[in-house]
Each structure stands twice: as structure tokens, then as C-alpha cells.
Amino acid sequence: MKILLINKFLYPKGGDAISTLTTGEVLSQKKHEVFYWGMEHPDNPKYQYEEYFVSNVSYDSDSGFFHKSKAAMNVLYSLEAARNLSALLKVNKPDIVHLNNFAHQISPSILSVIKSHDIPIVMTMHDYKMVCPTYSMLCGGNVCEKCQNGQFYHCGIKRCTKGSFFKSLVNVVEMYLHHALLNIYGKIDLYISPSEFLKSKVTEMGLKGKIVHLPNFVDLSLFKPSFGFSERRIVYVGRLSQEKGVETLIDAVCDSNLQLTIIGDGPLRAKLQDKVEAHSISNIEFLGYISGQALHNEIQKAMFLVIPSEWYENNPLTVIEAFALGKPVLGARIGGIPELVKDWATGLTFTSGDVVDLRNKIQLLVRNEEKLFEMGQNARLFVEKELNEDVFYRQLVNIYQSVM
């Protein structure tokens, strides 16, 4: 089978990119012909057909009006993306296109191009972009579902996109154009949801179309389990941003004798470090972004991993990777996290955003060292049985064949 995988980022940046790349690796190992298309970036490895990639676009800078206007048009309908992909498909036509995250930098202009070549399309949803203008279903740091059934104007009223009226307006126009006027997402033959929660939530919010559940996976050969721990330490791994609940975690452990290692980077890093320093909190350390074996070593030393999210997490790879390393997880009871973290089986859950409940659950786990060992074993077995690449591959090929 010849498969084209599309994601705007094609280097390890975030869960969508990692999922795209690992999916491609599994398919290639099974002798399928896989090629990629996305956005140019200096961190990209060498790709076949990279001359057809779209130009590198960043929406993080506070640029002038002309640049903002041009960027807004690109979000709504990228002519470059449509033109470049059309040229690629004339050179090498796949049997199926597997979309991932293509919002903004690429835009849905590519959907009409793919269908004009009579190619089936599946899409893995990594967030809530199909039903929420800002993708996160957050407004002012709180979970928000006001855009249900196409009421996207709420995003503009509340300035949900980074507090900017202009950016929020662009996202509102984008959603009405793509969904209500053009129904451009109707060209997608089937959606893949890594969590049952996301599948249920986007349906509840008004997304039309067939959705199947296919969880993320890991290559178990890359993860050596360690069921014990060498230090009275817990660990957080992830982005340092408000919705991840890291400040809640800091508040929960700041007055304890338990060490907390925070691994990751993001917009809140400076604020969080300043808070720790200002209050002379000595049991919390920031390691910044690390990956590979260095990351595994830090997780293996810990008693358990904490995922204190305060938004609708999908199917967090961080949890699955911790399980693969033989570590239980203390996770917020929100989004798709409880599908993975089963109380006293693979970890423990707590009320999202509740400092007291989080503190109590941390202390409860620390007092149950034998149970930590048992839950770590259960977590590893769960991944070995249900979240390995062979299970993922068989289900994915069945999905592809169902739309061909």
C-alpha cells in the first residue's frame, strides 16, 4: 500500500508530529511505501519530495498588519499548500492520504486537491480543532463548550485566541468558512480518535462523520521497565503552560519533603521558576526539555509520574511512555486520562485543579510503596497487551482498507 502522511510539523514537536512519524516507521517496517508532506523547517530531517513542502510559517510573533493579514488569509485558504500538494500528487499518487494536524500553516485547502485526485482520506484528531476555534476547548484557562453545534462566534466575543480580538476573529471566520459555508471537512472519509473521550466529545459538540477509536502506541523495544525507584521523587513531563496544571502540582508539593522534578519547557517556565525561587522552595527542580534515554532515566528514578492537566487531554503519550517504563501515573480525572489511569491498577486519579485532592493522593501513593511496584507492573503489562505497535498496525490497516 502506498500511503501519504501529512502533518504540518515533521520533526519531533508535540504529540501530533511524534504520532505521524512513528506511524510512518511502523508502516515502513511492514513494507508499505510511505512518504510525507508538510511544512519546511530547519529541524526537519531530509525528506523525499521536500521540494513540495509549504513554506515555514510561524504565528507566534507580534508582526505588522501586512504580515498578520497575509497570515490570516493563509489560515483560511492556503493557495501555496493547494498548489504544492497538487504538484506532488501528479508525481506520486498514494492509495490513501492520512491527515494529522494541518490547521493554520497548511489549511484545509488541500482537501479539495486530494479528492480531485480520487484519493480516500482518513484523519487522526489530536485535539478539538474540528469543533473549537482555538483547538483546546479552553477560554480564560477554563474548560469551555460554548461553541457547541457551530456557535463559533463565542470565540470572538470572549477573545479566546491568546486574548487577541484579531486572532480570535480569524479563527471564527475560519470555522464558519470551512464548516458552515464550504463543508470542506465533509471530504474526509473517516476520523480516527486516539481516545474514546475525544470521540464522544467532538460528536457531542456537533462534528458529523464516522469516527473510530485507535489509541496511541509505543515501540516497547525502546523502553526498559524499572518497577522500583531509587529516590523519594515524583516527576512531571510535559509542556509548561497553564492548561497543564503544573502550578497546581507545585502548590501540592511545595511544603512536603518529597522531591519534584519538572521536565519540559513552555510559556510558564519563567513564572514557575520565579515562584519556586521567591518562596525558597528547595524540593522542586526544573530540568528543561530533555528526551531519549536521558528522559527515561529521570522517569525510572521516580516513584511515579504526575499528569495534573486542567484541560481535556486526549490520549497522552506521556502516560503511555511512563507505563512502558514500569511507572504508575497519578493523573487528573479529566479528558482521556481515566481511560489509561485506572485507580489502584495502573495508578490513581484525582479531581482536576484540586490542590488538596492532589496533595492527598500524592501522600497516599507515597505511603503505599508495595502497591506502586504492583501498579508499575500492571501498567507495563497493559501497554504490552493493548498499546503495542502490532495491535496498532493491524487496526490501522483495517481502517485504511475500510475506506478504499
Image (cartoon, grey):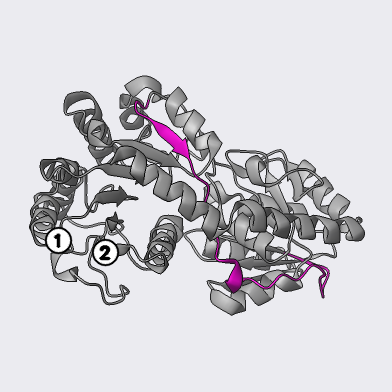
**Residue under the image location 51 percent in, 65 percent down:** 265
| Quarter of the picture holding the C terminus | top left
Comes first in the chain, label 2 or label 1 = 2
Residue under label 1: 92
Q: CA distance from mark 2 to mark 1?
A: 9 Å
Q: Which mark is residue 35?
A: 2
Q: Closer to the camera, 60 or 307?
A: 307
Identify which amino acid the numbered label 1 is placed on.
Answer: Asn
Residue at x 16%, y 41% (from the top left corner): 115
In the figure, is residue 130 to the left or right of 237? left
In the image, is 320 to the left or to the right of 82? right
Residue at 37%, 27% (x, y): give it.
207
Secondary element under disc 1, as helix, strand or loop, is loop
Query: Quarter-wise, where is residue 57 in the image?
Result: bottom left
150, 337: nearer the viewer: 337
- Bin the neighbour count of mark 2 within 10 Å (Cα to Cα): few under 14, some 14-19, many 20 and up: some
* Residue 217 rendering spot, x and y as whole percentages: 54, 56
Which segment is the magenta one?
A: 207-234
* In the image, residue 181 above or below residue 301: above
Whether residue 250 appears in this view of the structure is no
The answer to whether mark 2 and mark 1 are in CB contact below 8 A is yes
The answer to if 24 sits in the magenta stretch is no
Circle 1 residues within 10 Å: few <14, some 14–19, many ≥20? few
The three-letter amino acid code for the residue at tag 2 is Phe
